Structures are given as C-alpha cells and as structure tokens.
Amino acid sequence: MPGLESGREPGPERDREDGREHDSERDREHDPEHGLEDDPEPPEPSGTPSQNPFLAPGAKNGGEVPDLPKHTLALDVGGTGVKAGLVTRDGELTRTWRRATRIERGPEAVIETIADFAAELLAQTAADGTPAAAAGFALPGIVDEQSGVGVFSATIGWRDVPFRALLTERLAVPVTIGHDVRAGGVAEARIGAGRGSSRFVFLPLGTSIGGAIMIDGKPHPGGHGRGGELGHFVVRPGGLPCGCGLAGCLAQYASAGAVAARYAAAAGTENTGALDVAAKLATGDPIATRIWDEAVDTLADALLTISAILDPGRVVIGGGLAEAGDTLMVPLAKALTAKATYHALPELVPAELGDLAGCLGAGLLAWDLVP
Ligand SMILES: [Zn+2]
C-alpha cells in the first residue's frame, strides 16, 4: 500500500515542510551523522547529587530507599531521522538526540539502528545518573500497538516486524510500541492542544496527512490498526492521483507537501515549501491563491464529513501547513461554517507540540508501563 505513511514520507523538503526550520528543540539537536550527542544544556540534576543514581536523594551508598528513575526514553522513527529524548512523567523533554535513519540501507539495517540507538542511550543515560524506567517507540506506517508489530512502512520498507518482542529482548527496560501520529495525539491529549477535550481529532498536515481519533485521551486505532488515515479521505472523486492507489485524496490537496509541490509545478519554480506559498498570498499571487484556496476548501469538506461521522468537540491541526497560523485557520473556520447545515462544528485549534509530538507521546506511553 504505497503512500499510506501518515504524513511521514521522507523527502528533501521534509524538515522544511514540517515548518520547523528554527525550532528551538531542533536547534539543540546535533549532526545526525555523528550519532549520540549530548544536549548542550544538560538538565538540572534533580535531588541531591549522588554517586549512585539509584540511591534516594541524601541516601548514602548502601542506603535504604532506592531512587526511582525520573525519565522514560522515547524514540520517534521518521524517514529521515530518528528523534530521541528523555521524557519526565509530566511530559517534559529534558534531553534530545537525533540519528539519521538512512533508509537507503534497507529495512534490516534501519531496524538495527533503532535497537542500537536505544541500547546506547539507555546505557549512557544510566551512566549519567538519569536512568530510564521504560522505552517508547513511535513508528511510521501501519502499526499494531496491541501486538507491538510494525505491520508495514512504505517509506522504510519493513513488513511485520515484531518490534516489541525484539526490543524487549535487547533492552533491559519495559518497551511500548506506538504509531507515530497516534502517539502525537496522545501527547497533544495529555500536555498539548487536546487537553480538556474528551473527543478530538488530531490532524497533522505535513509532508502528507496523518490522523488520530482521540477518545478520552486514547487513540482509537480501529479494528485493524488502520483507523484515522484522514489523508486518504477522498474529497475530490476522480481528482489528483494518490500514492495509495485512489484519486482525489485530501493529502493531494491539503498537505504541506502537496501545497508546496503543486505551487512549484504550476509556477514553474523550485519547491520552497508551503510556508512560502502562504507568504505569497499577501502579494496577491494568483497561483498561490488558487492552490491555497483549494487546500482550505478540501480541508473544510473533510472536516464537515468528519463532523458528520464523529462529531468531535475539537480538531487539533498540526504539521507544516498549520505553521501558517491564521492564514490557514481563519479561512478554514469560515469555509467550514459556510458549508455546515445541521452540524455541530468542532473547535479548530493549532497543535501545540510541533514535530516533537511523536517523541513526547512515545515517552508518555512508556510511562504507562511504569507503576
Ligand atoms: Zn490516498
């Protein structure tokens, strides 16, 4: 099923499409080729410094009460890079690392990189006095969280990889496996723009479009782990062909990747990203206006049908296109209101966690394994 990748396909413009060029967290990350790198600003040591990280603050060596780990390790596997971080129980990311995925080496090498990276980070963080209590992995493609299996990734090329079993055997901590967008939805639900909403849809408009249907803080993965693929919602029957085999999918009109590519093709220019297209609206650029309007219109159609089916209280819109802020949100709310008849419309809000949502979600899901 090519193209079913929840907005995470790699590409030369991916990072830019995500709109995070100057993301402060990303700026703290280091050269991916050099693998394990320390955060330049190590976290404040918590508790009384001790030679033994497992000792309670103030306890002497051989003392009575062992100190519990204050972090989980999170890895978010993308087509270009694996983001890793230490996540506190409150959802604070205290250290981050990044390593290149290098998908050209084939799926087996990528799987090995994921396991090696996690094992090295667990060893290093334990040695640094910040041991992790558990590890969470956010994976692209089709993921069966129940069985801990990476069912399929078009980007990386793996099929039916028993990640949880494999990583549990390799790592000395409990392991949880999540779908990248659904993990992002968990993070938005607990510490981001979904807080306080019992029914919301997380809709990241990135290189492609993913989706997570969130009910009472939990993603609803569907009967086969394939629910929430809102990018492959046909909004223009017989329209633009999609990598999934259908035509007229939302992702072909309203993803940051589609807006950028469509503009570049129509204007005969280089692909400079969706935010550049958004910036051209102010100059009255007719091509930018046409493509942006179509993105807004197809999104409003999709949201109207989502409202009819799910009646979410809120839709949390993320990804590179949402970085355009009011340039997207204001006309989108207007178009949705204009199309609605009987519907009770959801509140439209921008996501709060940017491209760290998957990593944070993986870390928070790992905390669920810790009593
Ligand atoms: Zn499609």
Image (cartoon, rainbow, N blue to C red):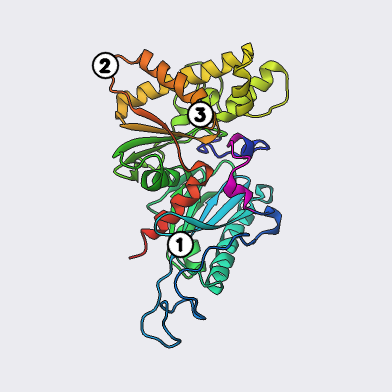
> On the image, numbered disc 3 is attached to which residue?
325
Which range is magenta? Answer: 17-29
Name which residue lies at 36% across and 26% down. Answer: 306
Name which residue lies at 60% across and 17% down. Answer: 282
Name which residue lies at 55% across and 56% down. Answer: 84
Q: Is residue 245 left or right of residue 81?
A: left
Q: Does residue 149 appear in the picture of this structure?
A: no
Contact (CB < 8 A) between labels 3 and 2?
A: no
Element assignment for label 1: strand
> On the image, numbered disc 2 is attached to which residue?
342
Which quadrant of the figure contains the C terminus? bottom left
Above or below, comparing residue 39 to residue 218 in the picture? below
* Camera-side mark, 3 or 2: 3
Q: Determine the CA span between mark 2 and mark 1.
A: 45 Å
Instruction: Count residues near mark 2 (Cα–Cα under 10 Å), then give few for <14, some for 14-19, many for 20+.
Output: few
Q: Where's residue 352, x and y in %?
A: 46, 40
Name the N-terminal-most of marks 3 and 2.
3
Q: Where's residue 136, x and y in %?
A: 46, 57
Q: Is residue 284 left or right of residue 188?
A: right
Above or below, comparing residue 117 to residue 128 in the picture? above
Above or below, comparing residue 9 to residue 121 in the picture? above
| Magenta residues, dominant SS class | loop
Along the viewing direction, whichever of 95 and 310 lies nearer the viewer: 95
The residue type indicated by label 1 comes to Thr
Contact (CB < 8 A) between labels 2 and 1?
A: no
* Camera-side mark, 1 or 3: 3
Q: Determine the CA span between mark 1 and mark 3.
A: 32 Å
Element assignment for label 3: loop
> On the image, numbered disc 1 is attached to which residue?
72
